[in-house]
Amino acid sequence: MNRTESLPMVALRGMTILPEMVAHFDISRERSIEAVQEAMASDQKIFLLTQKDVEVENPGEADLYRVGTVATVKQIIKLPKQILRVLVSAEERAVLNTIEFADPYLRANITIPEESDPDIAGEINREAMTRGLRDLYLDYAARMPKITKDMVNQIKEITELKKMVNQVAANMPLDYRELQEILEELDFDRRYELISFKLVNEMQIMNIRDEIQMKVKERVDKHQREYILREELKVIRQELGEDSGISDAEEFEEAAAKLEAPEEVKEKLKREISRFKNTIGSQAENGVIRTYIETLLEMPWEKRSEENNDIQYKRDLHGIHIYKGHYRKNRQKQEINNPL
């Protein structure tokens, strides 16, 4: 059966606390400090509700989520600059009905919904759901350094489904908005599915992240390896007195970069320069490649003469060629007939 209560309330900024959580938070707003002191003066119960916008200094009902957590204040530590660090043990969900008053502290009228044992048909189904969620969480925890071994061992020991769901939800290092989404799901079956989905989703994100990092690492390792090998090769060639070939290759690369030529020509040049570098020890082959590269670089690839579309000019030019041809033939006949 649902219960209605009136409790002092603290509006949390950038933080959502779920049932089964043991957490601490710092407060400095006067109304929050008064609310904690009021709770300590009575039964230590307090209602914790997250505000939607962390920048709002004095939140009203419209600035707050509707579902929060009833908790017990366990410890208060005074810090410098009038800040209190509050340690709480969260116990159960509660829905905000209304804020009764806001001064000198926030006091909330809340409804605590009854959470009976989940209606799961059959002991086998219950056990399967418990084990499935446990296995998902253990796989997730194995890849999350934030989750301690003590917490993992604690999850391993849980056999009751409802406690498993609450403990897993309370120990997932998610953003407060995602935790709020879990907190607001009052239906047990849908909450179980939501938690399972978030665990699987987080592991998929980690898989993609690891894959990207591996690809980046492979590229970096490849570039570092090539750089080291090139530096070592450069030193060896310097020792052998062959360093001039490297400087020639660098000149070829600079000239190729400036060359205005088709892409296939540039690709061919790139390959030949690479061959040139690798054949510095072989003078014969190196000389042939050098000549080929120099020839490619000297070719006027992108240079064209201006076209003359004047028909009369072409006819005149053609006539000159015909005249010269006849002249040469007549001159040859004369040279043949002269001796005779």
Image: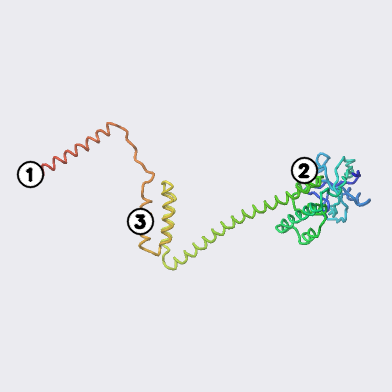
Three-letter code, disc 3: Thr
Callout 3 secondary element: helix
Which residue is more in the foreground, 201 or 301?
201
Q: Which mark is residue 338?
A: 1
**Residue neighbourhood size for the residue with mark 3, other residues' Cα within 10 Å, grouped as few (<14), some (14–19), many (≥20):** few
**Residue neighbourhood size for the residue with mark 1, other residues' Cα within 10 Å, grouped as few (<14), some (14–19), many (≥20):** few
* Residue 180 visible within the image: no
Write the residue at 36% across / 41% down.
Answer: 304
Q: Is residue 172 left or right of residue 31?
A: left
**Inter-mark Cα distance, 2 to 1:** 114 Å
Q: Which mark is residue 49?
A: none
Tag nearer the camera, 2 or 1: 1
Residue 192, position in %: x, y? 78, 49
Three-letter code, disc 2: Asp
Q: Which mark is residue 291?
A: 3
User: Which quadrant is the N terminus positioned in?
Assistant: top right
Q: Is residue 168 left or right of residue 279?
A: right
